[in-house]
Image (spheres, grey):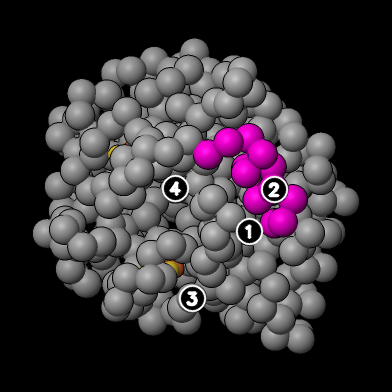
Amino acid sequence: MKPGQFLELAYFGITTVLFRRKDPLMGSIILTDRCNLSCRHCAVGNITSVIYPYSRIKADMEKMYSDGIRILFLYGGEPFLWQDHGITLRDLVMEAKRMGFLLVNIVTNGTFRLEVPEADLIMVSLDGGRDSHNKIRGNTYDTILENITDSLSDNICIYMAVNNINKGDIETVCRTAVSLQNVKSISFNFHTPYPGTEDLMLTRDERKDCCDRIERLIDEGYPIFNLRSAFPYIIGNSFMTPCHQCIVMENGKQWTCGRCIEIPNLCSQCGFFFAAEFSLVFSGHVRVIFDMLRTYSRYI
Ligand code: SF4
Ligand code: SF4
């Protein structure tokens, strides 16, 4: 990240904490819920399968930018399935950069060629070693590793959702990540028990065990993009929800924190580390703020 961008984000952070502002900083746009996979833990793919038109996505990006959002995530469904009359995901990333977003990131299942060098970060899901991953995401493990290896980008973040199928694979994923040249970091979430997927949820003790192991891996020098200072709050779900600095838009509709906010009682079982981390940072939690500055400056 360039120094000017860093200062802009720092100004946002300081004024948010001092004046208890609730303005958003980070926005996610759902380009489509269409997906080529049918993951075991998924509750969001292929509900409508609509691919929203370019004009809609552009209007959502403009709205976010005018609301002050400067960090943008494009996701799905599978965002690489998005296209409109020859306009591709790569064009959307370039458009967002032209608009002025400081960081433009993609969240993908990694089964398509990762040819968007303009993206600041490409988050690719890898849910364990080959066996666990394929059990959760179908027979896609080898394709994903191939696409990461062949990627035009060297700014890939491996993204693992830990559940009770793959909870033993945290170390394996870290070792795989560092063996791949284009991978810069690894990010973990815990499974959030969307209706119909409750059986995959970890208990509090299992979350604690996973966080202890992730901390050990951080100490061993693995490039883990999570904030250890937030772990106690994630284990106990004791952080404030929703996170007002995060916005999601789909087809012109907007939600604070996530679309999941509409599901009764889900926030009290949230497994999204970012929700905890951003909520703690912007409520002025000093240890987490320093942890974020140190960690993010390493991987963005
Ligand atoms: S890749 Fe993502 S959107 Fe597609 S089925 Fe899996 S979890 Fe759902
Ligand atoms: S805290 Fe945010 S991300 Fe977590 S379940 Fe609630 S709305 Fe979703």
Does the Cβ of the disc 3 residue fall within 8 Å of ligand 2? yes
137 on left or right of 119: left
The residue mark sitting in front, 3 or 2, is 2
> Real-space Cα distance between discs 4 and 2?
30 Å
Disc 3 designates what residue?
A: 242
**Residue 151 magenta:** no
The residue mark sitting in front, 4 or 2, is 2
Q: Give the quadrant of residue 178.
A: top left
Tell me the crowding category of disc 4: few under 14, some 14 to 19, or many 20 or more residues within 10 angstroms, Cα based: many
Disc 4 designates what residue?
A: 187
Residue 62 at x, y percent in the picture? 74, 50
**Residue 53 magenta:** yes
For badge 2, the amino acid type reads: Ala
Q: Tag 1 or tag 4, which sits nearer the N-term?
A: 1
Indicate whether 4 appears above or below 151: below
Disc 2 designates what residue?
A: 59
Residue 289 at x, y percent in the picture? 63, 70
Q: Which residue is at 73% across, 31% downward?
A: 94
Q: Tag 2 or tag 4, which sits nearer the N-term?
A: 2
Quadrant of the rendering where the N terminus is positioned: top right
Q: Which residue is at 56% across, 42% downward?
A: 74
Q: Which residue is at 44% across, 53% downward?
A: 219
Q: Which residue is at 65% across, 50% downward?
A: 60
Which residue ends up furthest to the right in the rendered image? 4
Helix or strand or loop: what does disc 3 sit on?
A: loop
| Residue span colored magenta | 52-64
Frontmost residue, 154 versus 67: 67
Q: Give the quadrant of residue 272.
A: bottom left
Does the Cβ of the disc 1 residue fall within 8 Å of ligand 2? no
